[in-house]
Amino acid sequence: MFNRFINIWNYFSQIGIYDGIASRDARITKLINLFVFSIFVMVIFSFGFQLIKHLVESGEVKFHSLLMIVTFAPFALVFVFNYYKRYKTARLVIIIYTLINNLFWAFTNIGQDSNIYYSNVILAIPIVIFFRKFKTQAALICLTFIFFSVSYFVDTNYPGYIIRTYQNPNFNIIAFGIWLAFSFLMMRFFLQEIDQAEARLQKQNIDLEDFTRLASHDMKEPLRNIISFSSLIKSKHLKILPKEVESYLSYIETNGYRLNELLDGLSSYNQINFTHSSQLEEVSLESILNDLTKELKSWIRETNAIIEYDKLPIIKANPSHMKLLFRNLITNAIKFQPKNDGHIPIIKINYKEDELQHKFSFEDNGIGISEAQRKNVFKKFKKLHSRKEYDGTGLGLATCEKIIALYRGQIHIVPEKENGTTICFTIPINFLPNFSRTSD
């Protein structure tokens, strides 16, 4: 007997699940089937129990028992629509007919006594899970509120019952049990979806990190060989080479250096994470800045750039993160300057703090960033200018944003700036990192 019930349970749970259906839709369809099947089992059990009880007590079948069968029977349409692959219609039946059914029972003394229409508040959970479009969700939520309001008005203001039925003392428990189970299953499904999505995203991120690490490491050696041999051919055989071949080799070198720069940017971007607590230490940002000015000394001298800065703090951070952050902001400020003789790049680094965070701003007198460009400036590989105008990888500010996000801070561009660019960012004073997997 039990095995037969399990076979029936499995049969109904698989209705509408065919090859090619998306895994998420298959899980929702199975969940809906099991919910409707459970409703029918509970209704049939309740009907049988009441039928026997009433026949023993009074020798007649009470009207409300037959009414219960009639009002719950339309839920069978869910199986029909799922069988014919009308999944959205099946889900609408679950929501809309539940509202209709609850409204109907509000006109009976059973429904009014149990306030069954309060179960409508749970419908927000399946509405969000069943339907992805916001307009559909909003429409169904509004419809739910309308049905609830009508049911509440009937319960509190209606002078009499349209249908006066036998008062079942167990009706409250049955109705509450059905909707409690439904909401529990929906929330379980929702949490499982989140867990699966996070697991898939984490795996994709790990695969991407591995690929980026492999690409940036293994591609550099053949790339260096390409650049070296191109340069070697030019230096040793320049006299016998046609001019067009020399230009071709120069083109190979230029693009080789550009690709090498891109691989360096990808490698740096990929390494922005925390793997263990030893990566955090007391970092003097003034020392970081001094080291950078020494490394960029020739470029700063060539452009006559001036870097002014406030007294910078000592913060707990990863030194490589802070160095990469300051390097990208400074090099961007020097690079994106008007191309006219006599213009001197001026970079001002301002700092202040409050009880919660360090506040920095990097201000330059460069070409600035237009209002239309500001929404894309932190996107990866999004370059605002052509290579002929300004060379770059499109990873500089994206890397800065990733670093600031890692430290749970905020970064933005001051919109009121007319000339030049001011980039502001914050770093929380009491920062606690999340550690990722250990690097290979």
Image (cartoon, rainbow, N blue to C red):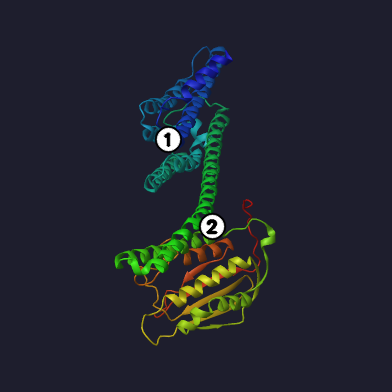
The answer to whether residue 50 is seen in the rendering is: no
Which residue is most to the front?
240
Along the line of sight, the residue nearer the viewer: 288 or 356: 288
Q: Is residue 192 above or below residue 225?
A: above
Q: What residue is pinned by disc 2?
A: 270
Q: Nearer the viewer, mark 1 or mark 2?
A: 2
Secondary structure category for the residue under label 1 = loop
Q: Residues within 10 Å of mark 1 (few under 14, many from 20)?
A: few
Q: Is residue 73 above or below residue 337?
A: above
Q: Identify the residue shown where x is 47% and y is 31%.
A: 32
Along the line of sight, the residue nearer the viewer: 244 or 318: 244
Secondary structure category for the residue under label 2 = helix
Q: What residue is pinned by disc 1?
A: 22
Which residue is most to the bottom?
342
Q: Hey, what amino acid is under mark 1?
A: Ala
- Residue 321 at x, y percent in the picture: 59, 66
Tell me, for residue 322, which label it has, or none: none
Q: Hey, what amino acid is under mark 2?
A: Asn
Give the mark nearest the N terminus, 1 or 2.
Answer: 1
